[in-house]
Amino acid sequence: MSTDRSDFTVDTAKERDYLLDYKSVDLMSLRRTAILDFPIDNVTRDEAVALVLHHIEQKQGPAHVIFVDPVKLMRLRSSRRLQHLNEGLNLILADGAGLLWGAERLGQPLKERIPMIAMLMDIVRLAWKTELTIYFLGDKSEYLERVFANMQRSFPGVRIIGRQAGSFNAAREALIKESIRKSSPDIIFIGMGFPAQELWIHENRDHLANAVVIGIDEAFGILSGKMKRAPDWFQLRGLAWFWQVLTKPFLLDRLIATIAYFVKVLWVSFRQKP
C-alpha cells in the first residue's frame, strides 16, 4: 500500500480483509517523534488509517488530521497566528521527503512518508467497505462534483452524504454547520488550503460532532483531474513542493520556508554532534 496514486482504481491484485488488517494494529505501541521540536506521528500508512478508524469508533469529539511538509512545519512552529493550533492536532502525518531526511538527520527516523492522495484513497476504501459516511467541504463545485462522480463509479455505494463548495459568508457558513450537525458524518475532507482549513477546523470544533476532519489542501482539484499534478519523478521522491516552486515562481515564500527548514535541520544536527 505504499504507491501514491491519484486515480480511483480499485486494486484487486491482492485480496485481503482490510478492516482486519487495520484492527490488528497495536495502537498502544505507536509513538510520536519530533522534528525541530514539532511533533510528528511516527507511523506507517496502514497505522495511520488504523488511527483514523480508532478515532471514528471512539466518538470522543472531532479528531483533526493534518499532512505536514517542511513548509507547513516551519509555519506551524514559528507563526504566532498558527502556534495555538498544535495542541488540537490529533494526527500529524509526514507528507514530504524533506521530513524523512530531517528526522534521520536529527536521529529520530520516521517509518515512512505518508502521501496525502494515497492515504485519502485508503480512507475512502475503508469507508466504502465499512459504510462510514463522508462529507466534502471547500474548493470549487466542479471539482467536488467530478470527485463525487468518480468515487461513486469506482466505489459503488460509497456514502458521500454532503458536499459544500467554495468560500462562504456567515449566513451560508451557518447553514453548512447545521448540515454537518444533522448529517453527523464520520469523515470530513476539507479543501480550503493551508492554513485556512486548519484555522476553520480549530474555530469550529464544537460544530463537527465526532468526525475525523482532514485538511486536504488542493486534493479535490487533483482527484478531479482538473489540476495538473507534479510529474511522477517528483511525486515518488516527495518533491511535489519543488515542482510547484518551479512552475509557480510566485510561491517564493514556500521556497524560502523550505530553505530555512533545511538550514535549521543542518544547524541543529551539527550542534547535536559530540
Image (cartoon, rainbow, N blue to C red):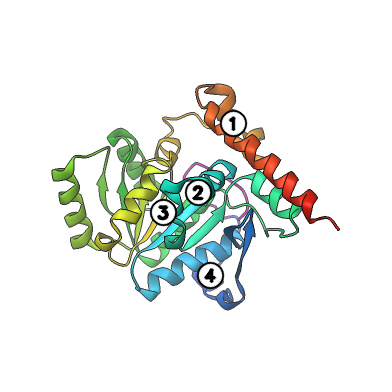
Residue type at the position of mark 4 = Tyr
Q: Residue at horizontal 55%, vertical 22%?
A: 247
Identify whether 125 is placed above or below 243.
Answer: below
In whole angstroms, how far apart are the C-alphas of marks 2 and 1?
16 Å
What segment is highlighted magenta in the picture?
1-12
Q: Which residue is mark 4?
A: 22
Q: Residue furthest left?
A: 171
Q: Nearer the viewer, mark 1 or mark 4?
A: 1
Residue where numbered disc 1 is placed: 255
Q: Main secondary structure of the magenta part?
A: loop
Is residue 262 shown left or right of residue 195?
Answer: right
Q: Position of residue 17 (x, y in %)?
A: 53, 69
- Asked if residue 33 is positioned above or below residue 255 in the image, the reply reads below
Upstream in sequence: badge 3 or badge 1: 3
Query: Upstream in the sequence, badge 3 or badge 4?
Result: 4
Point out which mark residue 214 bears.
3
Q: Position of residue 18 (x, y in %)?
A: 52, 66
Instruction: Classify residue 257 by image quadrant.
Output: top right
Circles 3 and 4 in contact, beta carbons < 8 Å: no
Residue placed at 42% from the left, 55% from the top? 85
According to the image, label 2 marks what residue?
76
Q: What's the residue type where badge 3 is placed? A: Ile
In the rendered structure, does residue 263 fall within the stretch colored magenta? no
Which residue type does callout 1 highlight?
Leu
Residue 42 on image: x %, y %: 62, 62
- Tell me the SS state at disc 4: helix
Secondary structure of the residue carrying numbered label 1: helix
**Residue 7 falls within the magenta-colored stretch:** yes
Seen at 31% across and 34% down, the residue is: 140
Task: Give the SS element for disc 2.
Answer: helix
Distance of label 3 from label 4 (alpha carbons): 19 Å
